[in-house]
């Protein structure tokens, strides 16, 4: 029996509808919670909510602000080899459709998330897009990451494309203007 891809991760074209980014832009005036913004980010890139991560730079380390379950999991020093740390320190985005074969910190993949499908939240990351979140002056505030999880790459959904990377970069520009990305802002 053939295995079906996860809902929302089929081989449909990877272009987000233009109104999704406009909706994200409108949120800046509403002071939204990170959870709501990340839900919109999942919609824009057609991934599950448990495949979105948003990290904020605090005192030289990255801390998860989404998913909320990872807020207490510790910090990632910018000097580490973690993908998020490299993205923040080099300001270079990453798109990898063979991420499972790349040596990376997998501790965060094992944390149980409240909104995941049964066991799906703990599936390994197979594909990833990681971009810096920087303010208008170029100061890095954090990192936005979107992934596709699965038991193997063929079960994790469509490959990410250059268009997906551009969509995430545009979204990161918008997210950088949100209050919760400021180092001292409360997270709720």
Image (cartoon, rainbow, N blue to C red):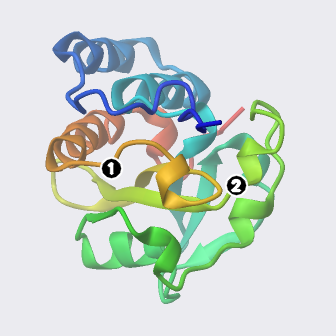
Where in the figure is residue 44, as x and y percent of width and height?
Answer: 35, 26
In the rendered structure, the answer to whether residue 36 lies left or right of residue 139 reads right
Residue 23 lies, with reference to residue 15, above or below; the image says above
Depth check, front residue: 32 or 110: 110
**Element at badge 2?**
loop
In the rendered structure, the answer to whether residue 68 lies left or right of residue 59 reads right
In the rendered structure, the answer to whether residue 70 lies left or right of residue 96 reads right
Residue 14 lies, with reference to residue 65, above or below; the image says above
Report the quarter where the C terminus lies: top right
Depth check, front residue: 4 or 86: 4
- Give the residue pinned by disc 1: 159
Depth check, front residue: 134 or 114: 114
**Element at badge 1?**
loop
Q: Are marks 2 and 1 in contact (CB under 8 Å)?
A: no
Residue 15 visible at all: yes
Where in the figure is residue 165, as x and y percent of width and height?
Answer: 23, 49
Where in the figure is residue 175, as x and y percent of width and height?
Answer: 35, 36
Q: Which residue is depicted at the point 66% across and 38% down?
A: 187
Q: Label 1: few (<14), some or many (≥20) within 10 Å?
A: many
- Give the residue pinned by disc 2: 123
Depth check, front residue: 27 or 49: 49
Q: Label 2: few (<14), some or many (≥20) within 10 Å?
A: some
Q: Which mark is residue 35?
A: none
Name the outermost residue toward the front. 1
Q: CA distance from mark 2 to mark 1?
A: 17 Å
Residue 54 visible at all: no
Q: Which residue is depicted at the point 31% across and 12% down?
A: 23
Report the quarter where the N terminus lies: top right
Residue 29 lies, with reference to residue 11, above or below; the image says above
Q: N-terminal of the two: label 2 or label 1? A: 2
In the rendered structure, the answer to whether residue 103 lies left or right of residue 116 reads left
């Amino acid at each position: 029996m053939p295995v079906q891809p996860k809902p929302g991760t089929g081989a449909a074209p990877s272009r987000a509808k233009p109104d999704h980014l406009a909706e994200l832009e409108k949120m800046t005036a509403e002071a939204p919670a990170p959870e709501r913004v990340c839900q919109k980010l999942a919609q824009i890139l057609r991934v599950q909510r448990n495949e979105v991560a948003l990290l904020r730079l605090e005192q030289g380390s990255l801390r998860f602000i989404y998913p909320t379950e990872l807020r207490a999991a510790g910090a990632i020093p910018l000097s580490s080899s973690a993908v998020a740390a490299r993205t923040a320190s080099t300001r270079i985005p990453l798109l990898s459709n063979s991420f499972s074969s790349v040596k990376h910190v997998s501790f965060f993949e094992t944390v149980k998330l409240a909104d995941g499908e049964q066991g799906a939240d703990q599936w390994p990351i197979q594909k990833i897009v990681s971009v810096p979140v920087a303010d208008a002056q170029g100061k890095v505030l954090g990192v936005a990451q979107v992934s596709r999880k699965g038991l193997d790459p063929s079960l994790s959904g469509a490959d990410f494309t250059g268009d997906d990377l551009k969509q995430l970069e545009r979204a990161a520009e918008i997210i950088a203007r949100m209050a919760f990305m400021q180092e001292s802002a409360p997270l709720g």
